[in-house]
Image: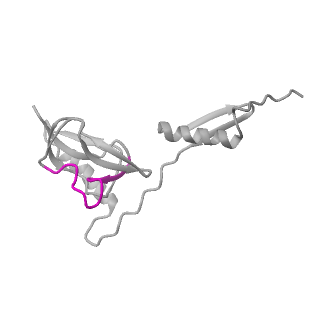
Amino acid sequence: MPKRRTDARRGTPLDRLRELAALLDEYGLSAVSARWDDVRVRLERRPAPPLPAPSLPAAPPAAAATSAAKSEGAEGAAPGHVTIEAPMVGTFYRATAPGADPYVREGDEIKEGQILCIIEAMKLMNEIEAKVAGRIVKILVENGLAVEYGQPLFLVEPLH
């Protein structure tokens, strides 16, 4: 029977799994595979289930509000306006904290690269930046609602 080669630097199988899990987080990967000796491992990140929307008597359900915002963003875009879309799935926040001033308001002039909002995804706060300089014509999503990838967030009139 052939003798198995061991490498003290590799650590235990649990250490190897932890290293792979760290790679998922560090590089934002959805899956990672590895093979050592006769062992094959695949770690896969599954999207977190959507958070339940707070129940308010006069507010529409989150799904209805999300699809309404999508259709409004698509139909309400005037020629020459730029739509800034959600780069990920998560929860849309207009400010850093509930009582804080929002990053932007309708009518505000913005610069390219300016932070417009935050999208919380998997307990990480992701700052969303303007891709053009201009004026905020319309904010298409209510604060605290779930957004989908590619959903319109802002309608911007670019500076000429």
User: Residue 41: x, y in percent?
Assistant: 66, 38
Observer-nearest residue: 63 or 145? 145
**Quadrant placement of the N terminus:** top right
Query: Against 42, is 59 above or below?
Result: below
Magenta region:
89-106
Residue shown at 64%/41% (left/top)? 17
Residue 30 appears anywhere in the view: no
**Residue sitting at the far left:** 160
Indicate left or right for 48 with 102 as reference: right
User: Residue 91: x, y in percent?
Assistant: 35, 53
Observer-nearest residue: 77 or 129? 129
**Residue sitting at the far right:** 1
User: Residue 118: x, y in percent?
Assistant: 31, 49
Residue shown at 22%/49% (left/top)? 103
Residue 44: which quarter of the image? top right
Residue 16 appears anywhere in the view: yes
User: Residue 34: x, y in percent?
Assistant: 64, 33
Verify whether residue 114 appears in magenta: no
Verify whether residue 100 appears in magenta: yes
Residue 58: which quarter of the image? bottom left
Query: Against 16, is 94 above or below?
Result: below
**Quadrant placement of the C terminus:** top left
Indicate left or right for 7 with 115 as reference: right
**Residue sitting at the far bottom:** 57
Residue shown at 34%/69% (left/top)? 55
Indicate left or right for 63 with 74 as reference: right
